[in-house]
Amino acid sequence: MVKRRRPLEDGGEGLPPGRWRLTSPYDIDARWAAKGEDLFWHAYKVHISETCHTIADAKDGSKKVVPPNLITNVATTDATVPDNQMTDTIHQAFQQRGLVPAEHYLDSGYPSAELLLMARKKYGISLVTPVLLDQSPQARAGTGYDRTAFTIDWEREQVTCPQGQASASWSPCRQRGTESIVVKFGGEVCQPCPVRSLCTSAKKGGRQLTIRARPLQQALDQARAEQASKDWQDKYKLRAGVEGTMRQAVAVTGVRRARYRGLAKVHLEHVFSAVALNLIRLDAWWNGHPLDRSRTGHLARLELAEIALAA
Ligand code: SF4
């Protein structure tokens, strides 16, 4: 079955979406993917999870007794699978292995409002990750009344604006596959409003807001408020450590280039790579050379890793 993304007659290229398009006669699991405007790669994507002990985790505060960060999960997909489709799969793997963390630090590709709630409810995991910010024109411009300027009364299904006016309608609907609620204020209150320019550009009607269903909106609001705080931003710096692991995986085990064909074998290669990195780290730790875990110590860490591998 061939599904066309945009038919030729409509000016499209007539090809199926990337996730269905075979890209090599030698490896039918491989796919092309793109990130941004200038990063293209062929084949697979690997998701690495690791523990992230901090110096504060050491029992006596000594840097030497901090256990090494070890890789706890490796997931491999073809290159087209979005990161957020793997969040729950990774959590399932943690659960099967008895390694469910209290907190999971992730980059912004992995969360969604649904996943924030699901991770907490299903596994007891708090996702520490930047969520998509409010995309309203007011929020993007940083001026005027964005969502946070309005008070939602979920019981009465009504929203109150900064001028104290109550919304005129509350309409649950589906937008791009997600449950949403469209809230409208009457044109008769918004058009004569003295602060209308801060709120809406509607020439006739009133302000319109789109919000998510109650638990999702509340989870999003809480996450957005938290990620604006300095405490959260300091805490989130811990996630950057995994970039050193990715660098180590590339430099020491050559993970960027698949040695085999087919998803199953490439995944096995990624697992072997993770085992090798864990052994390097344990070896360094057991032999009194804990790898430097500071963000500026990656080169030193890499050097030690290469020495350990060569030994
Ligand atoms: S424009 Fe309408 S919704 Fe906005 S503050 Fe004024 S009355 Fe309230």
Image: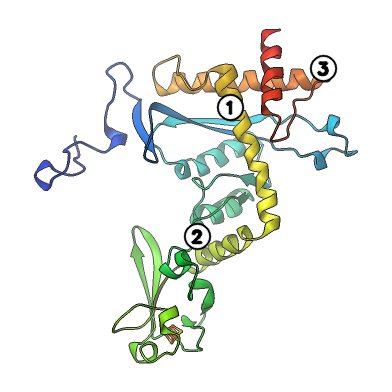
Real-space Cα separation, disc 2 to disc 1, in angstroms: 29 Å
Three-letter code, disc 1: Arg
Q: Residue at x 39, y 86 (%)?
A: 168
Report the residue marked by disc 3.
Answer: 287
Q: Relative to residue 299, is residue 36 depicted above or below?
A: below
Three-letter code, disc 3: Asn
- The disc, 3 or 1, on the residue closer to the chain's N-terminal end is 1
Mark 3 near mark 2, Cβ–Cβ under 8 Å? Answer: no
Mark seen at residue 112: none
Mark seen at residue 247: 1
Q: How is the image coloured?
A: rainbow
- The disc, 3 or 2, on the residue closer to the chain's N-terminal end is 2
Q: Relative to residue 11, is residue 248 depicted above or below?
A: above
Q: Residue at x 73, y 34 (%)?
A: 294
Mark 2 near mark 1, Cβ–Cβ under 8 Å? Answer: no
Report the front residue among 158 and 303: 303
Real-space Cα separation, disc 3 to disc 2, in angstroms: 46 Å
Report the residue marked by disc 2.
Answer: 133
Real-space Cα separation, disc 3 to disc 1, in angstroms: 23 Å
Give the SS element for disc 1: helix
Coordinates of residue 220 in the picture (x, y in percent): 54, 62
Quadrant in the picture for the C terminus = top right
Circle 3 packing at 10 Å, graded few (<14), some (14-19), many (20+), is few
Q: Residue at x 59, y 54 (%)?
A: 121
